[in-house]
């Protein structure tokens, strides 16, 4: 399988030009905070001092997980397909927020244990009816993992915009994400596991023990693609493929919460430069996400106590991303506004 080659955005001359453009706006140096950093980052991604956002979209990847057989979720597996139907009926939070910001929303069946039939508003990339139970065997075969990554790359290649947000739906996927986090970062399972869909303290302890036992069972799994195929989900693998191809195409990647970031953890092990293209929309309230961000050096735009998934953090952060580009274009300079600059 060919992994896209992602080039760092580093360019000393362009960075200096962007700094000069940002600093010449009518404001004290650095006073727009993280928006200035994002404006510069988007300029570096697009290789211009006049960055623009075109046709932003959010992709919601759905898949089921065999690990739910170990009683690691507060909800039954059927909720995955029921929520996909909710997305298609425009009734979920992500529908509300994407509609509010006029952002295109695409729902992908990466591997849901349900037959949706032919649906014009659902992108069918089903690899299989959910993964296997990684407590007992690898979640997917190498061939299934490769297929999911390839489908993701194809989705990115078909985009005509330059901003993509990532969301997901899959009962059991916080368990998969926590296992991936543990294997990639070496952080203890106890510090990776959270409530997911709303587990009790006893439920969280049980989930922790399931992951610890599975990690011991697959102790020799250390290579990123093996970690993905052993512990991941079809939606996580497809997200990773989409991320890699989108970054190769110099798109801005809006990263959502815990599960999306687990896909990025793996992508960054394959192509570290992908992080240059990532804007972290928020810090999830799911335990472990802050440590994921710390591990990746990510600085989130928002901290709202979200832990819903679906790409909701991306949709809520999109106006801030747009604001960072807008001030670059529309804000007056000291000279154009005839405002005196700071005295040395």
Image (cartoon, rainbow, N blue to C red):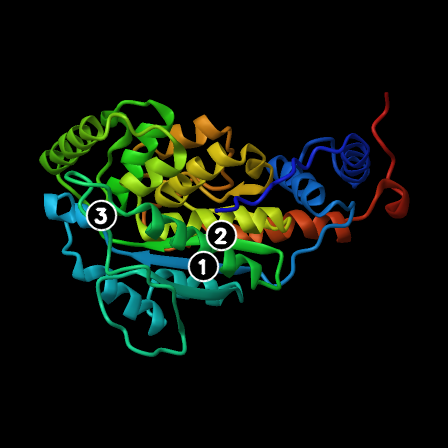
Residue at point 51% right, 28% down? 297
User: Residue 299, position in %: x, y?
Assistant: 51, 33
Q: How crowded is mark 1: few (under 14 residues within 10 Å), some or many (20 or more)?
A: many
Say which element carries label 3: loop
Say which element carries label 2: helix
Disc number placed over residue 59 in the picture, else none: 1
**Vertical order, 278 against 79 (above or below):** above
What residue would you read off at disc 3? Answer: 172
User: Residue 248, position in %: x, y?
Assistant: 61, 47
Say which element carries label 1: strand
User: Residue 104, position in %: x, y?
Assistant: 51, 66
Q: Distance between the residues labelled 3 and 1?
A: 19 Å
Tell us which disc is closer to us: 2 or 3. Answer: 2
**Vertical order, 102 against 286 (above or below):** below
**Vertical order, 149 against 106 (above or below):** above
Res 200 quadrant in image: top left
What residue would you read off at disc 2? Answer: 242
Q: Distance between the residues labelled 2 and 3?
A: 21 Å
Q: In this view, does 60 lie to the left or right of 55?
A: left
Depth check: 76 or 186 in front? 186
Q: Distance between the residues labelled 2 and 1?
A: 10 Å
Say whether residue 309 is visible: no
Say whether residue 212 is visible: yes
| Quadrant holding the C terminus | top right
Res 175 quadrant in image: top left
Query: Looking at the image, is mark 3 or mark 1 earlier in the sequence?
Result: 1
């Amino acid at each position: 399988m060919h992994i896209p080659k992602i080039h760092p955005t580093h360019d000393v001359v362009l960075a200096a030009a962007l700094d000069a453009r940002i600093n010449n706006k009518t404001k004290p140096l650095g006073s727009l905070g993280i928006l200035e950093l994002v404006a510069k980052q988007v300029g570096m991604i697009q290789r211009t001092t006049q960055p623009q956002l075109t046709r932003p979209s959010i992709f919601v990847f759905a898949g089921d997980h065999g690990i739910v057989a170990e009683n690691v979720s507060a909800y039954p597996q059927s909720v995955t397909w029921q929520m996909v139907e909710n997305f298609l009926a425009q009734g979920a939070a992500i529908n509300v927020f994407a509609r509010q910001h006029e952002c295109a929303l695409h729902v992908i069946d990466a591997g849901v244990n349900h037959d949706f039939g032919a649906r014009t508003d659902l992108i069918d990339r089903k690899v299989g009816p959910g993964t296997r139970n990684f407590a007992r065997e690898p979640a997917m075969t190498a061939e299934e993992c490769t297929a999911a990554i390839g489908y993701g790359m194809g989705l990115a290649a078909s985009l005509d915009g330059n901003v993509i947000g990532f969301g997901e739906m899959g009962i059991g996927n916080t368990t998969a994400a926590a296992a991936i986090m543990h294997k990639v970062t070496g952080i203890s399972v106890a510090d990776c596991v959270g409530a997911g869909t709303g587990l009790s303290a006893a439920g969280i302890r049980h989930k922790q023990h399931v992951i610890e036992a599975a990690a011991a069972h697959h102790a020799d799994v250390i290579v990123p693609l093996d970690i993905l195929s052993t512990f991941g989900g079809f939606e996580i693998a497809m997200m990773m493929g989409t991320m890699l191809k989108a970054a190769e195409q110099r798109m801005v990647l809006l990263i959502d919460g815990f599960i999306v970031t687990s896909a990025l953890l793996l992508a960054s092990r394959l192509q570290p430069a992908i992080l240059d293209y990532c804007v972290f929309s928020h810090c999830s309230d799911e335990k472990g996400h802050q440590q994921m961000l710390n591990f990746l050096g990510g600085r989130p735009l928002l901290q709202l106590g979200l832990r819903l998934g679906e790409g909701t953090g991306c949709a809520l952060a999109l106006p801030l991303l747009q604001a960072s580009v807008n001030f670059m274009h529309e804000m007056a300079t000291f000279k154009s506004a005839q405002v005196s600059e700071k005295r040395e």
